[in-house]
Image (cartoon, rainbow, N blue to C red):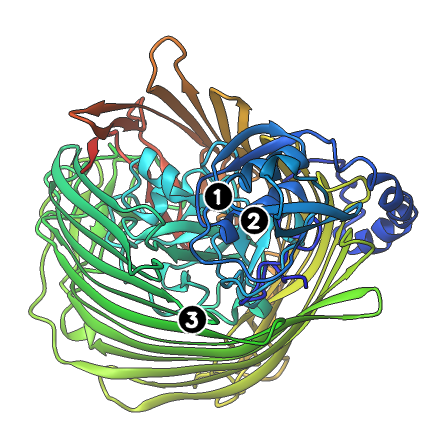
């Protein structure tokens, strides 16, 4: 029998090419031909080629040389990796024993050679079933007599839905990514632009926060100043706050403030709206989605200690322990602990961070159970970097030194705890039921948002005010579903039915009772700010409940060379809110929306090139209309953001490209005036349109040289604004050109030494809808090195890096209307890791 791959949870069948990870480049249409036209064009142009190629390819699979990189591991996992990298189907005659392990293979081989090496000394052989699949069976003759053929896998194996996709050549990104309810999908099978950054690049770049990882992505920019107490982002020109980042595909479970990187195995970035796949996010992000995959115990024991230094005087320690237990290694335990304290790159600012996480998993015969738990506290003392407003002055002046501490004396204390349990059970050979439940809490006290001033003149004089705040969030989330695979004639189906819910309770103190008087300072020569009195009691201010029902089907045609994904999610949004001072209820919101997805992948010339297109929507909660409008008491329906996209992915073996062309339209609330009526109405008639072109690259140019990054062109326009006053203007916080390109070079004459460098460019951008306030373009250079060796028989890695090598001072982006963020100061990082 055949085992379903990708989303099927209890089997490892890899339909032909279904889990291969490749990316590509191709020709883009002219701007007037937007991606919505691509579906018909792709079908008309390539269906004849598909039919011809399906016949011609059968004879070539046996001898085709291709790159393989499969570590020694349990044989079931190795065969899954083989199907991904070969594009063939594997069928197993019987059940694979859990203790069977594969040999490691790395290099260019034919499918026969690679499979023979994997099965060496296993007592198993194989033979071709047809031109695209192979049968694996027990041997009654010596292994040298093996005959090789096409591949597919069958029998009772561990879940492939959550099976971690293997790394791509170079180890910086993965071959696949989680697409929400669709589960882990190979890049070449995904009708979207996705990138999954690995734990290896997190370690090699010494990324201590999520922002450090996303410095590699040309479509991601930042909406908070470096050195602040939290991180917010933009993807494809739209905001994504840190609380909209998901953990294992579920919202509301990650720590507040900065997300610790020590427990992260993958950072997965999905470009574009994602409401159908992930559900509505707590704060309505529509430009993309970021998902965190936590670490699990590997097949080999791990014990690693890392010591670190960060300028100006911050020291840290991190411990990473992983081991599997039991005769069959069914129970896995992964522990991560970290501590860091000292002065940061912002002058005299200090940060203390403590973190602990536990990840456990148990692999039963036809079931699997996982648990993740964490606790962290992050404390910032004696200052912060700035957000600077220019609306009063009416123009932007030069940035101050990047290490300027304009708010000496302020602090913020933040702590978070969370736990998530996930289980799945195989219902026969093709179906799996799954369920997950999580709970998290985040508390803060201090000067979380009072970190901005408003500039008054060209000399940098500014008016400031500080806010002593306190609050907490309690979040509970759950998901359950059924997923499986079947066929109707020659058409394959991979279906998933899911029910999910998120409950989010917010408590805030009344900030009006803890706000300082305004004071005059200077952004170039700041003074100590004024401070208010103690914060008051934290009261409940909001209850949000998101529930949804979703159904999706990925249909496969012509030997999986055409994949069509159809799906829809019914999303309900309920919100109640209360005034933090009077405790009077201010809103009662209850609305629902149906959001669809349509995705297409076509492989007309074999598995190394994928043409893709999609239509997908994003959802943001509408608004309760307040007393200052003529339609007071109404509730606006959820805003539906719409994306059409088309692209090409090309995998050249060890180097991959993705070229994407897209359009996103996002509605918003605007005031609409009617003649003879005193008050305006609030309506969801506003619109912003972002059109973009992206080129992403990753992988190995040579065995010693790796590239990662890309370039993006983005045109953001305000299509409909209040009174038409800003119609046609450029959208704020949308630079036309952005680029990130990083390179690594293994020095050939000194084994173990690697040099790396990265350049980042961001074009000019506006801070306001009227386009009166423009930030200049900026570029930044980063560099680093690492040396891998052995000392006293132990593996040791020394790493060093410099962020902002030239110590440039620049405005990095936009926090809010008229408010600019500051770039990172020059920051030196050093670390040493030892396996013991």
Q: Given contact means CB atoms under 8 Å apart, are the residues at marks 3 and 1 in contact?
A: no
> Looking at the figure, which quarter contains the N terminus?
bottom right
Residue 483: % across, % down: 59, 73
Residue 549 occupies quadrant:
bottom right
Between marks 1 and 2, how big is the CA–CA gap?
9 Å
Residue 377 occupies quadrant:
bottom left
Residue 702: % across, % down: 54, 20
Tell which circle, 1 or 2, labels the residue nearer the N-terminal end: 2
Mark 1 closeness class: few <14, some 14–19, many ≥20 residues within 10 Å: many
Q: Secondary structure at mark 1?
A: loop
Residue at 18 percent of width and 56 percent of height: 355
Query: In terms of depth relative to the viewer, which is nearer, 774 or 275?
Result: 275
Residue that mark 1 sits on: 102
Mark 2 closeness class: few <14, some 14–19, many ≥20 residues within 10 Å: many
> Looking at the figure, which quarter contains the C terminus?
top left
Q: Secondary structure at mark 2?
A: helix
Residue at 91 percent of width and 51 percent of height: 44
Residue at 34 percent of width and 64 percent of height: 361
Tell which circle, 2 or 3, labels the residue nearer the N-terminal end: 2
Q: Given contact means CB atoms under 8 Å apart, are the residues at marks 1 and 2 in contact?
A: yes
Q: Secondary structure at mark 3?
A: loop
Between marks 3 and 1, how big is the CA–CA gap?
44 Å
| Residue 598 in view (yes/no) | yes
Residue that mark 2 sits on: 79
Tell which circle, 3 or 1, labels the residue nearer the N-terminal end: 1
Mark 3 closeness class: few <14, some 14–19, many ≥20 residues within 10 Å: many
Query: In terms of depth relative to the viewer, which is nearer, 31 or 497?
Result: 497
Residue 635: % across, % down: 52, 85
Report the disc number at residue 282.
3
Numbered circles on residues, count = 3
Q: Residue furthest front?
A: 141
Side of 596 relative to 447 (left or right)? right
């Amino acid at each position: 029998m055949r085992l379903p791959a990708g989303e099927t949870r209890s089997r490892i069948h890899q339909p032909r090419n279904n889990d291969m990870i490749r990316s590509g480049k191709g020709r883009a249409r002219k701007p007037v031909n937007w991606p919505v036209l691509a579906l018909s064009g792709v079908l008309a142009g390539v269906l004849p080629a598909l039919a011809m190629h399906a016949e011609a390819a059968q004879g070539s699979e046996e001898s085709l040389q291709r790159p393989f990189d499969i570590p020694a591991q349990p044989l079931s996992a190795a065969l899954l990796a083989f199907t991904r990298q070969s594009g063939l189907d594997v069928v197993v005659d019987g059940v694979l024993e859990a203790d069977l392990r594969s040999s490691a293979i790395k290099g260019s081989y034919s499918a026969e050679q690679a499979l023979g090496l994997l099965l060496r000394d296993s007592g198993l052989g194989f033979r071709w079933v047809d031109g695209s699949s192979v049968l694996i069976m027990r041997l009654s003759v010596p292994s040298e007599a093996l005959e090789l053929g096409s591949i597919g896998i069958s029998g009772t194996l561990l879940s492939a839905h959550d099976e971690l996709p293997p790394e791509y050549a170079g180890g910086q990104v993965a071959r696949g990514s989680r697409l929400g309810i669709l589960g882990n999908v190979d890049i070449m099978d995904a009708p979207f632009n996705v990138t999954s950054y690995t734990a290896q690049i997190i370690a090699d770049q010494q990324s201590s926060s999520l922002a450090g990882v996303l410095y590699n992505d040309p479509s991601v920019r930042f909406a908070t100043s470096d050195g602040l107490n939290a991180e917010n982002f933009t993807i494809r020109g739209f905001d994504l706050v840190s609380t909209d980042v998901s953990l294992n595909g579920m919202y509301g479970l990650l720590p507040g403030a900065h997300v610790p990187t020590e427990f992260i195995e993958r950072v997965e970035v999905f470009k574009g709206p994602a409401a159908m796949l992930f559900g509505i996010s707590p704060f309505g992000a529509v430009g993309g989605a970021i998902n965190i995959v936590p670490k699990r115990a590997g097949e080999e024991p791990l014990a690693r200690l890392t010591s670190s230094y960060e300028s100006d005087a911050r020291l840290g320690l991190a411990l990473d322990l992983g081991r599997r237990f039991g005769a069959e290694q069914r129970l896995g335990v992964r522990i991560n602990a970290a501590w860091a304290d000292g002065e940061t790159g912002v002058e005299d600012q200090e940060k203390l961070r403590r973190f602990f996480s536990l990840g456990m998993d148990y692999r039963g015969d036809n079931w699997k159970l996982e648990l993740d738990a964490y606790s962290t506290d992050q404390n910032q003392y004696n200052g912060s970097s700035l957000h600077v407003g220019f609306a009063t002055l009416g123009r932007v002046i030069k940035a101050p030194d990047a290490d300027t501490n304009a708010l000496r004396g302020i602090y913020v204390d933040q702590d978070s705890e969370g736990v998530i349990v996930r289980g799945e059970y195989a219902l026969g050979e093709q179906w799996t039921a799954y369920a997950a439940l999580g709970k998290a809490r985040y508390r803060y006290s201090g000067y979380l948002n009072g970190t901005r001033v408003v500039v008054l003149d060209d000399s940098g004089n500014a008016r400031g005010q500080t806010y002593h705040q306190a609050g907490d969030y309690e979040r509970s989330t759950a998901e359950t579903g059924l997923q499986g695979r079947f066929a109707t004639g020659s058409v394959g189906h991979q279906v998933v039915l899911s029910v999910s819910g998120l409950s989010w309770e917010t408590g805030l103190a009344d900030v009006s009772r803890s706000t300082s008087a305004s004071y005059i300072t200077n952004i170039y020569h700041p003074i100590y700010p004024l401070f208010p009195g103690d914060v008051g009691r934290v009261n409940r201010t909001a209850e949000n409940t998101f529930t949804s029902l979703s159904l999706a089907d990925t249909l496969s045609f012509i030997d999986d060379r055409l994949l069509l994904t159809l799906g829809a999610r019914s999303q309900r949004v309920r919100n109640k809110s209360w005034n933090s001072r009077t405790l009077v209820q201010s809103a009662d919101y209850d609305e629902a929306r149906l959001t669809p997805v349509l995705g297409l992948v076509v492989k007309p010339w074999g598995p190394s090139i994928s043409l893709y297109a999609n239509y997908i929507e994003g959802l943001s909660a509408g608004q309760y209309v307040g007393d200052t409008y003529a339609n007071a008491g109404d509730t606006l329906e959820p805003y539906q953001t719409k994306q059409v996209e088309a692209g090409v992915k090309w995998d050249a073996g060890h180097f991959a490209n993705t070229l994407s062309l897209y359009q996103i339209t996002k509605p918003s609330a605007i005031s609409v005036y009617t003649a003879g009526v005193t008050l305006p109405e609030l309506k969801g008639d506003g619109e912003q349109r972002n059109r973009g072109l992206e080129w992403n690259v990753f992988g190995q140019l040579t065995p010693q040289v790796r590239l990662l990054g890309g370039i993006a062109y983005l045109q953001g326009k305000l299509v409909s604004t209040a009174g038409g006053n800003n119609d046609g203007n450029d959208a704020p916080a949308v630079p036309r050109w952005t680029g990130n390109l990083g390179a690594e070079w293994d020095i050939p004459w000194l084994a173990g030494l690697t040099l790396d460098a990265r350049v980042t460019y961001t074009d000019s951008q506006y801070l306001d809808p009227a386009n009166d306030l423009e930030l200049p373009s900026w570029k930044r250079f980063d560099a680093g090195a690492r040396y891998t060796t052995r000392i006293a028989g132990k593996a040791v890695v020394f790493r060093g890096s410099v962020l902002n090598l030239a110590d440039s001072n620049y405005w990095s982006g936009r926090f809010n209307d008229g408010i600019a963020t500051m770039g990172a100061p020059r920051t030196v990082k050093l670390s040493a890791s030892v396996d013991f």
